[in-house]
Amino acid sequence: MSKLGDTLKDRLGLQLLEYPVPSHSNSIPYSLGGMTAASFGILVFSGILLAQFFVPDPDRANSSVHYLMDQIYLGWFLRGVHFWAGEVLSVTIFLHMVRVFVTASYKKPREINWIVGVVLLGLMVGLLFTGTVLKWDQEAYEALDHFVWVSGELGILGLPLTEGFTPGVPLLTRVYMAHISLLPIITMMALGLHLFYVKYHKLSPDPKDKESTKTIPFTQHILYLQRAGIGTIALIFLLATLIAPPLGGQPVLGLEVTKPPWQFVWIYALENLWVPSLIVAPFIIGLGLISVPFIDRGSETYWKRRPIAMALLAGSIILLVSLILWGSVTTMTHTM
Protein backbone atom coordinates (compact mmCIF):
# COMPACT_ATOMS: atom_id res chain seq x y z
CA MET A 1 0.00 0.00 0.00
CA SER A 2 2.87 2.33 0.84
CA LYS A 3 4.44 1.66 -2.55
CA LEU A 4 1.12 2.34 -4.29
CA GLY A 5 0.73 5.56 -2.29
CA ASP A 6 4.22 6.69 -3.26
CA THR A 7 3.49 5.89 -6.92
CA LEU A 8 0.25 7.91 -6.92
CA LYS A 9 1.97 10.75 -5.13
CA ASP A 10 4.70 10.81 -7.75
CA ARG A 11 2.33 10.52 -10.72
CA LEU A 12 -0.14 13.13 -9.45
CA GLY A 13 2.49 15.50 -8.09
CA LEU A 14 0.97 15.43 -4.60
CA GLN A 15 4.41 15.86 -3.04
CA LEU A 16 4.21 19.50 -4.16
CA LEU A 17 1.58 20.02 -1.45
CA GLU A 18 4.04 19.19 1.31
CA TYR A 19 5.64 22.63 1.38
CA PRO A 20 5.89 24.27 4.83
CA VAL A 21 3.37 26.78 6.18
CA PRO A 22 3.36 28.60 9.54
CA SER A 23 2.04 26.41 12.35
CA HIS A 24 -0.46 29.08 13.43
CA SER A 25 -2.37 28.41 10.19
CA ASN A 26 -4.01 25.45 11.96
CA SER A 27 -6.43 27.64 13.89
CA ILE A 28 -10.01 28.83 13.47
CA PRO A 29 -9.11 32.46 12.62
CA TYR A 30 -6.81 31.32 9.81
CA SER A 31 -9.38 28.81 8.55
CA LEU A 32 -12.22 31.28 8.01
CA GLY A 33 -11.28 31.61 4.35
CA GLY A 34 -11.53 27.83 3.99
CA MET A 35 -14.95 27.85 5.68
CA THR A 36 -16.07 30.53 3.24
CA ALA A 37 -14.83 28.42 0.33
CA ALA A 38 -16.71 25.40 1.70
CA SER A 39 -19.92 27.44 1.90
CA PHE A 40 -19.38 28.67 -1.66
CA GLY A 41 -18.88 25.12 -2.86
CA ILE A 42 -22.19 24.09 -1.28
CA LEU A 43 -23.85 27.10 -2.93
CA VAL A 44 -22.56 26.07 -6.36
CA PHE A 45 -23.58 22.43 -5.98
CA SER A 46 -27.03 23.13 -4.54
CA GLY A 47 -27.54 25.92 -7.07
CA ILE A 48 -26.96 23.52 -9.96
CA LEU A 49 -29.67 21.25 -8.55
CA LEU A 50 -32.06 24.13 -7.87
CA ALA A 51 -31.67 25.35 -11.46
CA GLN A 52 -33.34 22.14 -12.66
CA PHE A 53 -36.64 23.27 -11.12
CA PHE A 54 -36.56 27.07 -11.38
CA VAL A 55 -38.41 28.95 -14.13
CA PRO A 56 -36.82 32.42 -14.61
CA ASP A 57 -39.99 34.14 -15.78
CA PRO A 58 -41.89 36.73 -13.70
CA ASP A 59 -45.17 34.86 -14.14
CA ARG A 60 -43.82 31.48 -13.04
CA ALA A 61 -40.71 32.09 -10.92
CA ASN A 62 -42.44 32.27 -7.54
CA SER A 63 -44.74 29.32 -8.24
CA SER A 64 -41.77 27.21 -9.38
CA VAL A 65 -40.05 27.78 -6.03
CA HIS A 66 -43.26 26.87 -4.18
CA TYR A 67 -43.53 23.74 -6.32
CA LEU A 68 -39.97 22.80 -5.38
CA MET A 69 -40.71 23.32 -1.69
CA ASP A 70 -44.06 21.51 -1.62
CA GLN A 71 -43.96 18.86 -4.35
CA ILE A 72 -40.35 17.77 -4.96
CA TYR A 73 -38.92 15.14 -2.63
CA LEU A 74 -36.54 16.92 -0.22
CA GLY A 75 -36.94 20.10 -2.28
CA TRP A 76 -37.47 22.03 0.94
CA PHE A 77 -34.14 20.71 2.23
CA LEU A 78 -32.31 21.55 -0.99
CA ARG A 79 -33.51 25.15 -0.94
CA GLY A 80 -32.74 25.36 2.78
CA VAL A 81 -29.16 24.21 2.16
CA HIS A 82 -28.74 26.85 -0.55
CA PHE A 83 -30.22 29.58 1.63
CA TRP A 84 -28.26 28.76 4.78
CA ALA A 85 -25.01 28.31 2.87
CA GLY A 86 -25.42 31.94 1.79
CA GLU A 87 -26.14 33.00 5.37
CA VAL A 88 -23.11 31.18 6.77
CA LEU A 89 -20.93 32.55 3.97
CA SER A 90 -22.06 36.08 4.83
CA VAL A 91 -20.74 35.61 8.37
CA THR A 92 -17.50 33.79 7.57
CA ILE A 93 -16.40 36.14 4.78
CA PHE A 94 -16.96 39.13 7.08
CA LEU A 95 -15.01 37.48 9.92
CA HIS A 96 -12.26 36.50 7.47
CA MET A 97 -11.79 40.11 6.38
CA VAL A 98 -11.81 41.24 10.02
CA ARG A 99 -9.09 38.69 10.81
CA VAL A 100 -7.01 39.86 7.85
CA PHE A 101 -7.39 43.46 9.03
CA VAL A 102 -6.57 42.67 12.68
CA THR A 103 -3.42 40.76 11.73
CA ALA A 104 -2.50 43.42 9.12
CA SER A 105 -2.18 40.70 6.48
CA TYR A 106 -2.96 43.30 3.82
CA LYS A 107 0.41 44.98 4.19
CA LYS A 108 3.41 44.68 1.88
CA PRO A 109 3.70 42.48 -0.15
CA ARG A 110 0.03 41.39 0.06
CA GLU A 111 -1.72 44.61 -1.05
CA ILE A 112 -2.97 43.15 -4.34
CA ASN A 113 -4.46 40.11 -2.64
CA TRP A 114 -6.39 42.38 -0.27
CA ILE A 115 -7.86 44.13 -3.31
CA VAL A 116 -8.77 40.76 -4.84
CA GLY A 117 -10.46 39.92 -1.54
CA VAL A 118 -12.47 43.14 -1.69
CA VAL A 119 -13.54 42.23 -5.23
CA LEU A 120 -14.59 38.79 -3.97
CA LEU A 121 -16.63 40.45 -1.23
CA GLY A 122 -18.40 42.57 -3.85
CA LEU A 123 -19.08 39.50 -6.00
CA MET A 124 -20.53 37.63 -3.02
CA VAL A 125 -22.79 40.58 -2.28
CA GLY A 126 -23.92 40.49 -5.91
CA LEU A 127 -24.66 36.76 -5.66
CA LEU A 128 -26.62 37.26 -2.43
CA PHE A 129 -28.63 40.10 -3.95
CA THR A 130 -29.48 38.29 -7.18
CA GLY A 131 -30.37 35.18 -5.19
CA THR A 132 -32.77 37.24 -3.10
CA VAL A 133 -34.48 38.53 -6.25
CA LEU A 134 -34.94 35.11 -7.86
CA LYS A 135 -37.56 33.82 -5.44
CA TRP A 136 -39.76 36.61 -6.82
CA ASP A 137 -41.95 37.32 -3.81
CA GLN A 138 -42.76 40.77 -2.46
CA GLU A 139 -39.33 41.20 -0.87
CA ALA A 140 -37.64 40.16 -4.13
CA TYR A 141 -39.72 42.51 -6.26
CA GLU A 142 -39.00 45.49 -4.01
CA ALA A 143 -35.27 44.66 -3.97
CA LEU A 144 -35.23 44.65 -7.77
CA ASP A 145 -37.24 47.88 -7.84
CA HIS A 146 -34.51 49.59 -5.81
CA PHE A 147 -31.87 48.12 -8.11
CA VAL A 148 -33.67 49.46 -11.18
CA TRP A 149 -33.82 52.93 -9.59
CA VAL A 150 -30.05 52.88 -8.95
CA SER A 151 -29.41 51.72 -12.52
CA GLY A 152 -31.51 54.57 -13.87
CA GLU A 153 -29.61 57.10 -11.78
CA LEU A 154 -26.29 55.87 -13.19
CA GLY A 155 -27.28 56.99 -16.67
CA ILE A 156 -25.48 55.29 -19.54
CA LEU A 157 -23.38 53.25 -17.06
CA GLY A 158 -26.52 51.66 -15.67
CA LEU A 159 -28.24 51.13 -19.02
CA PRO A 160 -27.25 47.44 -19.35
CA LEU A 161 -28.90 46.83 -15.97
CA THR A 162 -32.30 48.28 -16.89
CA GLU A 163 -35.46 46.59 -18.14
CA GLY A 164 -35.36 48.22 -21.56
CA PHE A 165 -31.80 47.19 -22.47
CA THR A 166 -33.04 43.92 -24.03
CA PRO A 167 -36.67 44.43 -25.14
CA GLY A 168 -38.76 41.31 -24.78
CA VAL A 169 -36.44 39.70 -22.20
CA PRO A 170 -37.62 40.18 -18.59
CA LEU A 171 -35.04 41.72 -16.27
CA LEU A 172 -35.65 38.81 -13.88
CA THR A 173 -34.39 36.42 -16.57
CA ARG A 174 -31.20 38.44 -16.97
CA VAL A 175 -30.74 38.54 -13.20
CA TYR A 176 -31.04 34.75 -13.22
CA MET A 177 -28.38 34.42 -15.91
CA ALA A 178 -26.07 36.72 -13.95
CA HIS A 179 -26.67 34.63 -10.82
CA ILE A 180 -25.96 31.24 -12.38
CA SER A 181 -23.28 32.10 -14.94
CA LEU A 182 -21.63 35.53 -15.06
CA LEU A 183 -21.14 36.13 -11.34
CA PRO A 184 -20.05 32.55 -10.48
CA ILE A 185 -17.55 32.47 -13.36
CA ILE A 186 -15.97 35.77 -12.32
CA THR A 187 -16.02 34.67 -8.67
CA MET A 188 -14.19 31.42 -9.43
CA MET A 189 -11.56 33.29 -11.44
CA ALA A 190 -11.07 35.80 -8.60
CA LEU A 191 -10.96 32.98 -6.04
CA GLY A 192 -8.30 31.20 -8.06
CA LEU A 193 -6.25 34.42 -8.21
CA HIS A 194 -6.76 34.91 -4.46
CA LEU A 195 -5.44 31.41 -3.70
CA PHE A 196 -2.52 31.92 -6.08
CA TYR A 197 -1.38 35.01 -4.19
CA VAL A 198 -1.80 33.22 -0.85
CA LYS A 199 0.59 30.58 -2.17
CA TYR A 200 2.92 33.09 -3.82
CA HIS A 201 3.27 35.43 -0.83
CA LYS A 202 2.78 32.65 1.76
CA LEU A 203 0.54 32.93 4.80
CA SER A 204 1.25 36.04 6.83
CA PRO A 205 3.43 35.55 9.94
CA ASP A 206 2.03 35.59 13.46
CA PRO A 207 1.98 39.31 14.43
CA LYS A 208 2.97 38.42 18.01
CA ASP A 209 6.01 36.43 16.90
CA LYS A 210 7.20 37.43 13.43
CA GLU A 211 10.49 35.60 13.89
CA SER A 212 8.88 32.24 14.65
CA THR A 213 10.16 29.41 12.45
CA LYS A 214 7.57 26.81 13.51
CA THR A 215 6.06 25.24 10.42
CA ILE A 216 3.83 22.33 9.43
CA PRO A 217 3.38 20.62 6.03
CA PHE A 218 0.62 22.17 3.95
CA THR A 219 -0.97 18.72 3.74
CA GLN A 220 -1.50 18.91 7.52
CA HIS A 221 -3.16 22.30 7.10
CA ILE A 222 -5.42 20.79 4.40
CA LEU A 223 -6.59 18.17 6.91
CA TYR A 224 -7.43 20.93 9.38
CA LEU A 225 -9.31 22.84 6.66
CA GLN A 226 -11.20 19.65 5.81
CA ARG A 227 -12.40 19.34 9.41
CA ALA A 228 -13.38 23.02 9.46
CA GLY A 229 -15.18 22.61 6.14
CA ILE A 230 -17.05 19.51 7.32
CA GLY A 231 -18.12 21.39 10.45
CA THR A 232 -19.35 24.29 8.32
CA ILE A 233 -21.31 21.97 6.02
CA ALA A 234 -22.79 20.13 9.01
CA LEU A 235 -23.98 23.45 10.44
CA ILE A 236 -25.58 24.37 7.10
CA PHE A 237 -27.37 21.02 6.91
CA LEU A 238 -28.59 21.36 10.51
CA LEU A 239 -29.98 24.85 9.90
CA ALA A 240 -31.62 23.68 6.65
CA THR A 241 -33.33 20.88 8.57
CA LEU A 242 -34.57 23.03 11.45
CA ILE A 243 -35.37 26.44 9.92
CA ALA A 244 -37.14 26.94 6.59
CA PRO A 245 -35.98 29.96 4.55
CA PRO A 246 -38.58 32.71 4.04
CA LEU A 247 -40.77 32.62 0.95
CA GLY A 248 -43.79 34.77 0.16
CA GLY A 249 -46.33 34.63 -2.60
CA GLN A 250 -46.46 36.32 -6.00
CA PRO A 251 -45.53 40.02 -5.56
CA VAL A 252 -47.99 42.88 -5.81
CA LEU A 253 -46.38 45.42 -8.12
CA GLY A 254 -46.25 49.03 -6.96
CA LEU A 255 -46.17 48.28 -3.22
CA GLU A 256 -43.30 48.81 -0.77
CA VAL A 257 -44.05 46.93 2.43
CA THR A 258 -41.04 44.68 3.11
CA LYS A 259 -37.49 45.06 4.33
CA PRO A 260 -34.40 43.47 2.76
CA PRO A 261 -32.47 40.55 4.29
CA TRP A 262 -30.23 41.42 7.23
CA GLN A 263 -27.17 41.66 4.96
CA PHE A 264 -28.76 44.71 3.26
CA VAL A 265 -30.77 46.25 6.13
CA TRP A 266 -27.95 48.68 6.90
CA ILE A 267 -28.31 50.38 3.51
CA TYR A 268 -32.11 50.37 3.95
CA ALA A 269 -31.54 52.47 7.09
CA LEU A 270 -29.20 54.86 5.26
CA GLU A 271 -31.66 55.14 2.37
CA ASN A 272 -34.31 56.23 4.82
CA LEU A 273 -32.07 59.16 5.77
CA TRP A 274 -30.96 60.04 2.23
CA VAL A 275 -32.11 58.12 -0.84
CA PRO A 276 -28.86 58.60 -2.85
CA SER A 277 -27.15 56.53 -0.12
CA LEU A 278 -28.09 53.56 -2.30
CA ILE A 279 -25.43 54.78 -4.73
CA VAL A 280 -23.01 56.70 -2.54
CA ALA A 281 -22.61 54.27 0.39
CA PRO A 282 -21.40 51.19 -1.60
CA PHE A 283 -19.00 53.43 -3.56
CA ILE A 284 -17.50 54.94 -0.39
CA ILE A 285 -17.23 51.56 1.34
CA GLY A 286 -15.60 49.91 -1.67
CA LEU A 287 -13.15 52.77 -2.14
CA GLY A 288 -12.36 52.79 1.57
CA LEU A 289 -11.64 49.06 1.68
CA ILE A 290 -9.44 49.19 -1.42
CA SER A 291 -7.43 52.10 0.00
CA VAL A 292 -6.63 50.36 3.32
CA PRO A 293 -3.21 48.90 2.38
CA PHE A 294 -2.16 52.17 0.73
CA ILE A 295 -3.06 54.29 3.75
CA ASP A 296 -1.72 51.98 6.47
CA ARG A 297 1.80 51.43 5.13
CA GLY A 298 3.64 51.04 8.45
CA SER A 299 5.50 47.86 9.32
CA GLU A 300 3.67 47.18 12.60
CA THR A 301 1.22 44.25 12.45
CA TYR A 302 0.39 43.46 16.10
CA TRP A 303 -3.10 44.80 16.87
CA LYS A 304 -2.22 46.11 20.36
CA ARG A 305 0.34 48.45 18.80
CA ARG A 306 -2.09 49.74 16.13
CA PRO A 307 -4.63 51.69 18.21
CA ILE A 308 -5.87 53.94 15.38
CA ALA A 309 -6.53 51.01 13.03
CA MET A 310 -8.29 49.05 15.78
CA ALA A 311 -10.39 52.07 16.74
CA LEU A 312 -11.47 52.50 13.10
CA LEU A 313 -12.33 48.80 12.88
CA ALA A 314 -14.33 48.85 16.12
CA GLY A 315 -16.11 52.03 15.08
CA SER A 316 -17.00 50.57 11.68
CA ILE A 317 -18.40 47.38 13.22
CA ILE A 318 -20.42 49.34 15.80
CA LEU A 319 -21.80 51.59 13.04
CA LEU A 320 -22.72 48.59 10.87
CA VAL A 321 -24.45 46.75 13.71
CA SER A 322 -26.28 49.93 14.75
CA LEU A 323 -27.54 50.50 11.20
CA ILE A 324 -28.71 46.86 10.96
CA LEU A 325 -30.58 47.15 14.27
CA TRP A 326 -32.05 50.53 13.38
CA GLY A 327 -33.01 49.38 9.90
CA SER A 328 -34.82 46.38 11.38
CA VAL A 329 -37.16 48.62 13.40
CA THR A 330 -37.45 51.77 11.29
CA THR A 331 -40.22 52.38 8.75
CA MET A 332 -39.60 53.49 5.17
CA THR A 333 -40.64 57.12 4.70
CA HIS A 334 -40.66 57.18 0.87
CA THR A 335 -41.30 55.03 -2.17
CA MET A 336 -39.03 54.49 -5.17
Image (spheres, rainbow, N blue to C red):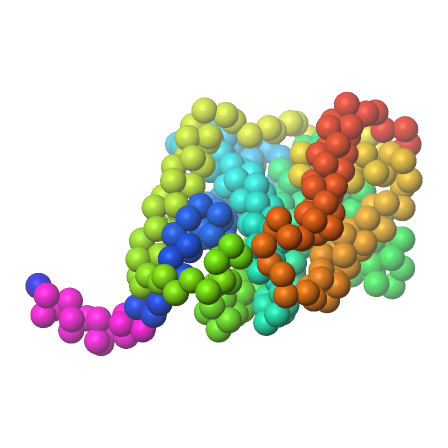
Front one among 324 and 261: 324
Residue 305, compared with residue 6, is above or below; it is above
Q: Is residue 227 left or right of residue 141?
A: left
* Residue for point 82% across, 48% down: 281
Residue 4 in the image, given as x and y percentages of width and height = 11, 68
Residue 125 in the image, given as x and y percentages of width and height = 65, 49
Residue 319 appears anywhere in the view? yes
Residues in magenta, as a range: 2-16
In the picture, which quadrant includes the N terminus? bottom left
Residue 136, compared with residue 278, is above or below; it is above
Q: Is residue 161 left or right of residue 65?
A: right
Residue 80 falls inside the magenta stretch: no
Residue 230, compared with residue 243, is above or below; it is below
Residue 218, compared with residue 232, is above or below; it is below
* Residue for point 46% across, 31% down: 240
Q: How many marks?
A: 0
In the picture, which quadrant includes the C terminus? top right
* Residue for point 77% across, 59% down: 287
* Residue for point 64% across, 27% down: 248
Q: Is residue 234 left or right of residue 43?
A: left
Residue 293 in the image, given as x and y percentages of width and height = 69, 64
Front one among 300 and 194: 300
Residue 24 in the image, given as x and y percentages of width and height = 42, 54
